[in-house]
Image: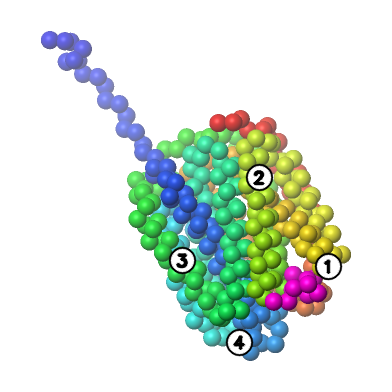
Amino acid sequence: MDIAQTSSSPPSPPAIPAASPLPSRAVGLLLNAAHTLDHLVLLVFASSVAAIASDFGLQRWEDLMPYTAGAFLMFGLGSIPSGRLGDLWGRRKAMLLFFFGTAASCLLVAATQTPWQMALALTVLGSFASIYHPVGIPMLLRDAARPGAVIGWNNMAGNLGIAFAALLTGFTVSLWSWRAGFLIPGLVCLALGLLFMRLAPEETLAPAKANHPRRHQSTASDTTRALIVITLAASTGSVLYNFTTNGNTELFRERLNQVISDPAHLGLLLSAVYVIAAVSQVVVGRLTDKVALRPLYLGMVCAQVVFFLLATQASGWWFGLAALGFMAAIFGAIPFTDAIMVRYVDDRQRSRMTGLRIGIAFMVSSVVVAGLGPVVKAMGFTFALFAMAAVAALTLVAIWQLPSDPPPRSP
């Protein structure tokens, strides 16, 4: 008898399983499509606000804009409990809540008849839409070999939602009514939720309880400093993002009134600007895998300042070029916050940290959305564009405090 076979060996310690298997290609596509819908449903209102105001009996579109503040307040504030749901309850279950809750909210908005009903329904929509960023993006990025590239494509998918919002509402307002602009994405969101429920694997453990190795080692002080910087930069960036995406329809209508007047054509032009500008996110995302973050981020924000200043003096097609420039620079800055999060924050608490960052940023920017109509009504778009250039300049101060980091090694 072989002694080696009969001798007992000490039992190995039980392994702590990972949170879930890696997302399949199909699940990854669904997560990117969810990002598209997340941005689309929040901007249908801004893209069709003139038609909604007319339907509700208001004289000016600016008077209706404050009613959307609740949606953006909850989109930010709701990110904090959404992040806790993702880490402590499970990201798959939280994403199912996103799909089905957003679908039901879109149908609710389409049924509204008064401005206050609209305000309440949009607030509910913003609450469910808040789930995606702190849950879907960490789910997609877990164990990504090249996180910058994944972030770039995901961010591009999100901003295609802005393009589709302008295109969808431009045609639905012309052909049917503004209500169809909410009905269509609501039904699409419902269908994607059913697919996600079928294809996304069950989680064995919530991410906060899983054993997940860190990709990057950083000191506690660097992590804290990076979180403060990206929260400040995300707040100013969110102001720019929400000012432009909520105000561009009326801004383009004013500056291009000598060239384009039809709502469908204007929506098509806005969609083209957003699609072209969104390509910058793929480029920047790939660069974050190869280049140090701080100088790259500073260069992108400098471009925002320059193009906002050029836009203050431009009209017609020259304004269109300036707008393409500042939208490309705004979209191109978005991947940095997620890239910094991947580099400095462990996956077990990434949803909570992302939710906290987004919560603060969007609570700040909700004030901008509420004040957009009154400010433009009182001061005009030229003043607003100068103000956005100043906000971009403040972002530079925040980014300068980011910890220095060497270019990341290729995996």
Give the residue number, with chain letter if any, for mark 3.
Answer: 188
Give the residue number, with chain letter if any, for mark 2.
Answer: 283
Residue 115 sits in quarter:
bottom right
Q: Secondary structure at mark 2?
A: helix
Q: Residue furthest bottom?
A: 57
Q: Residue at x 62, y 63 (%)?
A: 163
Query: How many residues crowd mark 4 within 10 Å: few (<14), some (14–19), many (20+)?
Result: few
Give the residue number, with chain letter if any, for mark 4.
Answer: 56
Disc 3 and disc 2 in contact, CB within 8 angstroms: no
Depicted 135 relative to depicted 223: above or below? below
* Mark earlier in primary sequence (1, 4): 4
Q: Quadrant of the N terminus?
A: top left
- Gap between marks 1 and 4 measured at Cα: 31 Å
Give the residue number, with chain letter if any, for mark 1.
Answer: 315
- Gap between marks 1 and 3 measured at Cα: 37 Å
The label number, if any, that marks residue 145 in the structure image: none
Q: Secondary structure at mark 1?
A: loop
Identity, as a three-letter code, of the amino acid under mark 4: Phe
- Gap between marks 4 and 3 measured at Cα: 26 Å
* Mark earlier in primary sequence (1, 3): 3
Identity, as a three-letter code, of the amino acid under mark 1: Ser
Depicted 9 relative to depicted 117: above or below? above
Identity, as a three-letter code, of the amino acid under mark 2: Val
Q: Residue at x 50, y 68 (%)?
A: 185
Disc 4 and disc 3 in contact, CB within 8 angstroms: no
Disc 1 and disc 3 in contact, CB within 8 angstroms: no
* Mark earlier in primary sequence (3, 2): 3
Q: Was residue 259 drawn as part of the magenta stretch in this picture?
A: yes
Q: Which residues are magenta?
A: 252-262
